[in-house]
Image (spheres, helix red, strand yellow):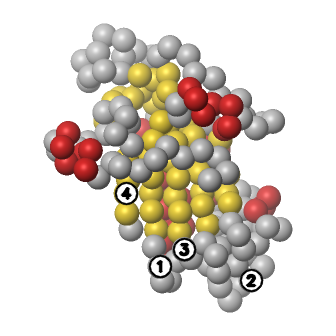
Amino acid sequence: MTLNCDMHLPAYGIGDEKRLMQTILNVAGNAVKFTKEGHVSVEASILSSEFVEEWRTPEFFPTLVDGVFYLIVQVKDSGSGITQQEIPHIFSKFSVSQNGSIRNNGAGLGLAICKRFVNMMGGHIWVESEGLGKGTTVTFLVRLGHCDSPNDPTHHGSGELITHRYTSSQEYKATASFPRYHKGH
């Protein structure tokens, strides 16, 4: 499993840390669960203004305003994949693949809860797969507030302070060298 973080990912943000972590753990857990051989990667970046239009869909219209940013998390695996027919149902409670021999354990409540949490955080989640045996990519965006430090006087409201931890900027930059991702890639 690999983790890649964009160099521009803020060290702090304001949002619902518990729901965000539960979403990341559920999505990454499913990727591991359905990948018997191969790889799983988790990539985190922020939505930049030059790519906002590419992320808009009829049901999701992110807008960048002062004080907020969108965190993009993309979990890719080389696992069992899913069919195009199953994608619309993947966020239903107790969704189980029709190909029971490959995905004999359904996603249960996990992805249904993830969708609910992401929506509550002003975001959007979707799944892409080229089909059975070709892996899966789950991408979600969530809206978070900017915060420069844990003692930032602008940190107010009901959101919790979310801290992105890294040990040194040199180490962080060395492990954070992936391009920005946008929908469709």
Q: Mark 3 — residue?
A: 78
Name the kind of residue labelled 4 in the image.
Leu
Q: Which disc, if any, is residue 3?
A: 4
Q: Quadrant of residue 116?
A: top right
The label nearer to you, 2 versus 4, is: 4
In the foreground, 134 or 14: 134
Mark 2 neighbour density, 10 Å: few (under 14) some (14–19) many (20 or more): few
Q: CA distance from mark 2 to mark 3?
A: 17 Å
User: Residue 130, how many percent across, how many down?
Assistant: 71, 69
Q: Quadrant of residue 119?
A: top right
The label nearer to you, 2 versus 3, is: 3
Is the N terminus in the top left, top right, bottom left or bottom right quadrant?
bottom left
Q: Mark 2 — residue?
A: 99
Q: CA distance from mark 2 to mark 4?
A: 29 Å
Q: CA distance from mark 2 to mark 1?
A: 20 Å
Identify the residue at horizontal 53%, vertical 34% (top origin).
47
User: Residue 176, how many percent across, how many down?
Assistant: 33, 48
Can see residue 112? no
Can see residue 183? yes
User: Residue 123, how many percent across, how many down?
Assistant: 62, 36
Q: CA distance from mark 3 to mark 4?
A: 15 Å
Q: Which disc, if any, is residue 38?
A: 1
